[in-house]
Amino acid sequence: MADRHPRTPAVEGPQPDGDGVSGAGRRPRILLTTEGTYPFSHGGVSTWCDIVVNGVSGADWDVFAITAGGIRRPFVFELPANARLAGHIDLWSERVTARRPGRRSNLRTGLAAELVHGLLGWDGDPQSVIDGLVWCRNNPEKIRAALRHPDAWSVFRTALREVLCADHGDRVAPVLDEQHVCDLFQTLCWIAQAASAATPTGPDAPDLIIVTAAGWAGIPAVVHHAMHGTPVALSEHGVYVREAYLAAIRGGESSGERWVHTRLARGLARLIYGVASIVAPVTSANAAWERALGADPDRIRTIHNGVLVPSKVAPMPIEPVVVTVGRIDPLKDVKTLLRAAASVVERMPNVRFDHYGPVPEGNERYAAECAALHLDLGLRDRFRFLGPTDDPYAVLESASLSVLSSISEGFPISVLEAMAAGRPVVATAVGGVPEALSGCGFTVRPGDYEALATGVVRLLEDPVLAASLGARSRQRVVHAFGQEGCLAAYADLIGELTGMRPAVTAPESGMDAEFTVLDALEQSEPEHRRSAPDAAPTSLPATDPS
Amino acid sequence: MSAPVGPTLGWDFADRHLERPTQDPLEAAVVLEAWGGVAPGEAFGLTMTDRPPREATFRPRVVRSDPLDPSLALGDLGFVAGVLGMGFYLSTLTDDLGARSVDMAWRLALPLSLAIQWAIRRRYLSGSDGLGRLRNDPRVLGVIAASMAVCVPLRPGGWLAACLVGIWVGGFVITRLGWGLVFGVALLTGAGVLRAGASPRLLLPLLTVLALTTATLGVVRHRPSDRLPGGKERAFAAGLIGAGVGGVLVLEPRFLWEGRAALVAITVVPALLGSVWGGWHMGKLWKVLPEALVRQPFATPGGATITVVRSLLAGALARVVLGASVGSVPILVWAAGGAGPIDDVWALLIAHLCLGVAGLAVSLLEAFDRWGSALLAVVTGCLACVVVNVLDPSHDLVPGSRIGIGAVVVIIMSGPSLLQLVANPARTLAARV
């Protein structure tokens, strides 16, 4: 693929970076592999990629994107001058790579069987598939012939039978039908295709590969690592395996589909955990999953997401407004949010909920269900779906507080942004949310809309408490989750693995170094209470489980 | 926060929430976390305890598949009517322009049109929003225009070939738009106008412009698709296969158009009717095969699925033969009434029927991405026609014999690959990537 942007020239000699640390003489080149995200889609991982690629400006970034479905995809993120799209493969599309006819000798007809044993077996060794994946890279023209060979099919079926019969972790032995088997075989074919995709070599060879999800995005990285020894780091935002289970559950999949999808996700995740020199979850909550799935605890290093902190805190609005920023997705449990809103509006009719977020591709049905529920609950203009926003801080200015109703999260940037904007947060206690909010907001059990509503009402009825929590939140972000710290941590990671610590472009925060909780309180106080200088933060609510 | 479940109740909580037995400890942990509010580390502790495995029972799934669109069948019939209409043009054209011009135009335009049609079908029209994909790529018009432009300077009959390409390709798209019947009626009306004395040099270009404009407007008013078009290589291969099928038809040297041009074209119609019917039946494969596969538990004998596919294929073949046979009756009656040499009509009808079967075979192979086998079959079929032409320079064989021989060769060459596809339908479906 042609360069969309000119390369940033390598800088000779020691290069000071934003922290004043010298590099080793040249800019590190990093291959960033993404899956269904940057630079083609919005979302938390994409935002993270955008922040890191722009912020770690002392590195050259090659983005290798994996998408699916043969959909026309324009860039939704503009790549900076130090980044380019170095590869893009589209799975489950009619545009297959590497269809050159080739000699049919030395076909690896056992490829699909190897993948079944290594990736699907509960006790399988995912590292055993690396040889096969490297073969795919070296013989792209033979993949189709190998997988279409009659032996490939029969050996694959035997392997699958063995895995299904083996003593494994399933408590309910899965029963597959022949269509499941066909789908699985096709999926394995696509894994082979993903492995065959060329990654940059020669002068463009990466010094480090950063994988942004422990799934398909890891396949090119694993192959490149095996062939060239390039170190791999995994930055895990959600937990790939957990999200695969959630998708299977909410999709109402049959036991066979569920087994195939979750086992494959588990196999791919374990494969990447085994190869990565550093597994960097964005929250320590994810680390528990990573350890449980076999990641070496010594290689796990939590690097929290970070956000820019706005210089000023907008005053609280007079009219109570609850803002939510997040895509309309079952993982965000928008239905619970709607039910909570209905409960709040019943108690406080003047409250308005503003939801900002896109309907991602494939979620149209869920969005329609949400719209129907909105209608059923009679929320009318008390709950508005306002579509995506490019400026979360602007929308947070109009907010009295922010709500998050997700059933799964990594370390949500939307929560950090609300905190940075000095707004109190009521959120479900999932993923890294309790870690982010620790002592600064209300957390409730996922799906418990009454508790969510109670938290919202409590803060709306007690502006002093709300202001106090908002101020604490902002302070917490400033100290622990600022963008500068996050970028520095990644620059450190890159430096550690490549011997070249790249320069970091300091984000334009505008934060006053002397900023205190009292400043925040003053700034975030509701306009109508400005005249009450004795307003002071009260203690955290006793019901706060975080 | 405190866990809502005790250490022994983790599995039960998950089972209750899911309203089914939980698959494995990881799924239980996910449920406890997402719906129970249990912290990850704690959730694992609650679910890693042993639990006796349970046997699941096999319950066939319900497969959702798009229903077949009956308007497309109507469109296909319209296209047949269009071909019939073109048949009526030929004798008038031969009278006006000369046999050589028409012969040349036919030999050039038919393979070229089929090539473009097959390529368009593979690259754009193979999905549910195919017309939207076609709309996104205005270069297709350029390809059609370029193909026509290549024909125009050729002598004799180049301009006529260009017109035929425009009408046939435009008609193909019009058919996909669901307006095939209108297209057929328009062509039949044109035939009447031509017989009434209108100049073909005026009418043919007019029809060409009309067909292409209608097709373009129809596609442009379609909603654009987000889906990318299919791969160029496969579309190119499909185009070559289409050209090969046309090649078998035009390598028959006894298509000399003096006097009998309409008869030659009209004898194609029954086979075309049968092919449309058979192809329509075979299209059910994408619905029937998954339905059969979900009913069959893994690792049990797959006889039922094989039977389903074999019956479908046999049904399609039967429809081609039956459709062609029934369609042939009026032509034979007409020929027996003194309108044409009955032996030649018989020979042509049989040859075209063979070609219909051959077309079905290679289109099946192409649809299953076995384009290499399909291409080999049509190339061999064309070569067989050439060999017969060399061995029979004086054209002693009956008209249509080359078509028949070429088609039979195509069928024979496709046979092993087709049998392989039918013998193991699950593998056939799985290995389409």
Image (spheres, rainbow, N blue to C red):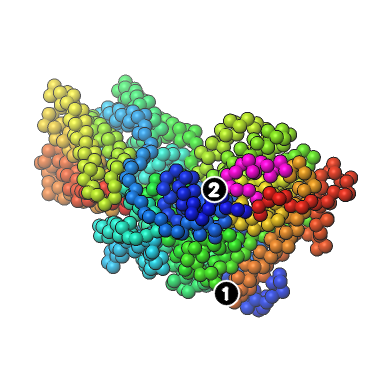
Q: Tell me the SS state at disc 1.
A: helix
Residue in the foreground of this view, choosing between A372 and A389: A372
The residue depicted at 72 percent of the width and 50 percent of the height is: A541
Query: Residue A337 colored magenta?
Result: no
> Which chain does the numbered disc 1 sit on?
A
Q: Nearer the viewer, residue B97 or A473?
A: A473
Is circle 2 on the same chain as circle 1?
no
Count residues near mark 1 (Cα–Cα under 10 Å), then give few for <14, some for 14-19, many for 20+: many
Instruction: Say what secondary structure mark 2 lies in.
Output: helix
Residue A511 vertical position relative to residue B139 in the rendered view, above or below = below
Alpha carbon distance from label 2 to label 1:
41 Å
Left of B391 or right of it: where is B427? right
Q: A174 or A116, which is in the foreground?
A: A174
- Magenta part, dominant SS: helix
In magenta segment, residue A449: yes
Q: Which residue is mark 1?
A: A498
Read off the residue under disc 2. B35
* Camera sees residue A124: yes
Q: Residue at x 58, y 40 (%)?
A: A335
- Which residue is nearer to you in this view: A25 or A335? A335
Where residue A75 sits in the image (x, y, percent)?
Answer: 57, 52
Q: Residue at 10%, 41% (x, y): give it.
A: B396
Q: Amino acid at mark 1?
A: Thr
Answer above or below: position of B332 versus A420. above
- What residue do we see at 58% from left, 47% from top? A446
Q: Position of residue A306 (x, y in %)?
A: 67, 60
